[in-house]
Amino acid sequence: MEYAVTATGPLTVKRFLDKYGHSALTIRAKDPVIEASAQFFNLVHGRKYSIAVVLDENDSVVGVLSLGGIVFAMCRHKENIFNMKASEVMSSPVHSVKLSDDIMSALNFMSKMEIRHVPVIEDGKLLGLVTRKDALEGLYDDQTLELNSLAEFVFRSGARY
């Protein structure tokens, strides 16, 4: 699926995060997988996530770990899963976007990479997470606001044609 940039200008990742939040579920690379999996039940700023961004001891992003990845690791490693660290089952390298990117580019990137979440990273540090669902809702809200503003301008200006 290809998304196109609209004529009203791009919704940047920074503007999107400022409006919808900079939260993300994080875990440590050294955390046992079983301990890390329990974190998925915790709310982060009122939300649950199906993906966690994996950080090292310096808070640098080193990978991502999804619920699906944990299930796959459990099936593959069976009872050894109890001795494994998050760093052993996480996905790496991390596909990410920057604050200056626009949401359309982020959506196209997620589509191309066949992923539903993308961390926002600058200088190795996590600044937030963009989900496909939230990005689409953000674009809808942004376009609705633009259309409402345009309609208000046209009808308040007294223009009839």
Image: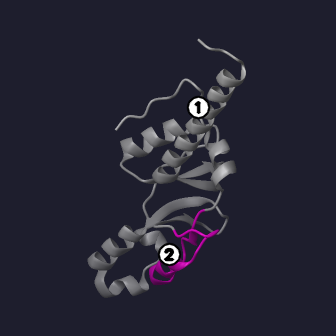
Residue in the picture at 50% in, 29% down:
5
145 or 19, which is in the foreground?
145
- Checking the image for residue 147, the label placed there is 1
Name the secondary structure under disc 1: helix
65 or 49, which is in the foreground?
49
133 or 97, which is in the foreground?
133
Residue 120 appears anywhere in the view? yes
How far across and down, in percent of the image, does residue 147 sit?
59, 31
Quadrant where the image shows the C terminus = top right
User: Quick one: which residue is furthest to the top in this view?
Assistant: 161
Residue in the picture at 52% in, 27% down:
6
- Determine which residue is flagged by label 2: 40
Name the secondary structure under disc 2: helix
Magenta-tinted stretch:
24-48
77 or 70, which is in the foreground?
70
- Checking the image for residue 30, the label placed there is none
Residue in the picture at 54% in, 60% down:
62
Compared with 122, 143 (above or below) is above
User: Quick one: which residue is furthest to the right in this view?
Assistant: 157
Magenta-span inclusion, residue 139: no
The numbered mark, 1 or 2, whose residue comes first in the sequence reads: 2
Residue 139 lies in what quarter of the image? top right
Marks 1 and 2: which is nearer the front?
A: 1
**Amino acid under disc 2:** Phe
Residue in the picture at 67% in, 29% down:
152
